[in-house]
Image (cartoon, rainbow, N blue to C red):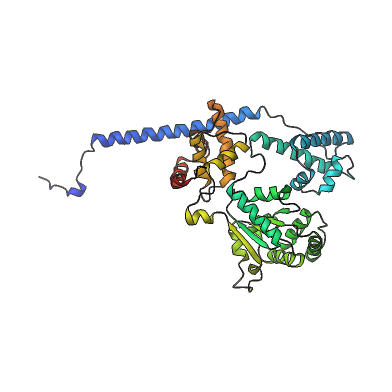
Amino acid sequence: MPPTPPEDIRLVPEPEDHQIERDIAARDAKASQTAEQAAQGSVVRQLVNDNQTIAEARMPTTETLSPEQINVYVVQVRDYMLRTNVSAAKVAREIDRSSSTVTEILNGKGKGDVSRTVRLLVGWMELHAKSAQSGMPNGFVTTSVTEKILAVLRAAQNSRTIALVLGPCGVSKSMVCKAAAEGLIAGSVHVEVTRGASRPGQFVKLWARRLEINDKGSIGAVEDRIIDLLKKANGRLQMLDEGHYLQGSSLDIVRDVHKQAGCGIALVGTIDVEKHTDDADFFHGQFARLISYRYDITEEQMHDGTPLYTVDEIERFAASMGLRLTRDGAKRLTGLACLPGWGGLGAASMLLIKAKLIAKADGAESISAAHLLAADQSSHTRRYVDRLNHRSEELLRKVKVA
């Protein structure tokens, strides 16, 4: 008779209950996968349907537009700007042209070959119209976060000192800067730095173009023009957005302009801004000592659990996109928007656009938590969505309902 195997390796028939549980798990996984595929298909089908209703303007492919073509397109752009209440200064910033150039063309007084600028204007109009159709937020949305950012920007202007506004992507930093430059802070200038324009030569020229002054010549010559203008400008606030791209000599330019022109400057970006400006141990605090105000958008949340947004703020944000949320939808979106690293209101707007398509296909007038979940599943794996749900559970319990 063969020896009895040890207990830990003895073969024991699997209970029937275990097999049932495995069957249920397999069925649920298949159902979840089917739901994800259905959600993705629903979004894509609705995109196709909506795209068929968008009439796209087509410009001639020739290099130079005729005077008659220029006149037709200028009238279209001017009428669109009047209907949508967009200023020439705003359009000029977005197509990287001076306000005077855009104004002259819109008034039919453009000089030289204006074809390229007219093409840029028409391209701007098409992009702006499509953004409006997509349901992006309409204008400035007030939240406790935007109010704090605005307060820090105004403090930097009034005291003519340097302020830091720190936070991850999507938490309204750029939105507030743009709104400030468009009138909330009179005379303020929004300079959006890019990685390609972060070195001293490119950065100083970018800054000069935003101030609509000559950007030709050496770094020193352009910097002197910026300083001369700002000395006469009675403390115009300079908002350097995406400031985390600036390091070393580029920050030296920021410091020199501030000290010699006496204007307020706000460095806005990720937490890397603080790392790059903390020179107390290396250069005797040449930059760090000039910083008077600092607002880290996520610091309160990390320390005491205060959420970035309330349910009511998220509902107002959705309303700015022409959308309505059910209460469970608003609470779910609030929990996600408050998650560090999720993307804040920027990611919320993208999710709402997809959820709107799913709700539309469902015949619903308001976006529910189920629609938001389906929208998430349309572009992410189930594991990713489950991880988000797990991370937001604690925050959902702390959300303040005003």
For the residue pair 90 and 34, the one nearer the viewer reads as: 90
Compared with 84, 208 (above or below) is: below
Q: Please say whether residue 114 is visible from this viewpoint.
A: no
Compared with 41, 316 (above or below) is: below
As drawn, is 360 to the left or to the right of 202? left
Res 207 → quadrant: bottom right
> Where residue 340 sits in the image (x, y, percent)?
52, 51
Compared with 193, 123 (above or below) is: above
> Where residue 68 sits in the image (x, y, percent)?
88, 33
> Where residue 135 sits in the image (x, y, percent)?
63, 35
Compared with 383, 152 (above or below) is: below
Residue at figure coordinates x 70%, y 56% from the top left:
239
Residue at figure coordinates x 58%, y 29% from the top left:
46
For the residue pair 223 and 152, the one nearer the viewer reads as: 152
Res 19 → quadrant: top left
As drawn, is 34 to the left or to the right of 91? left
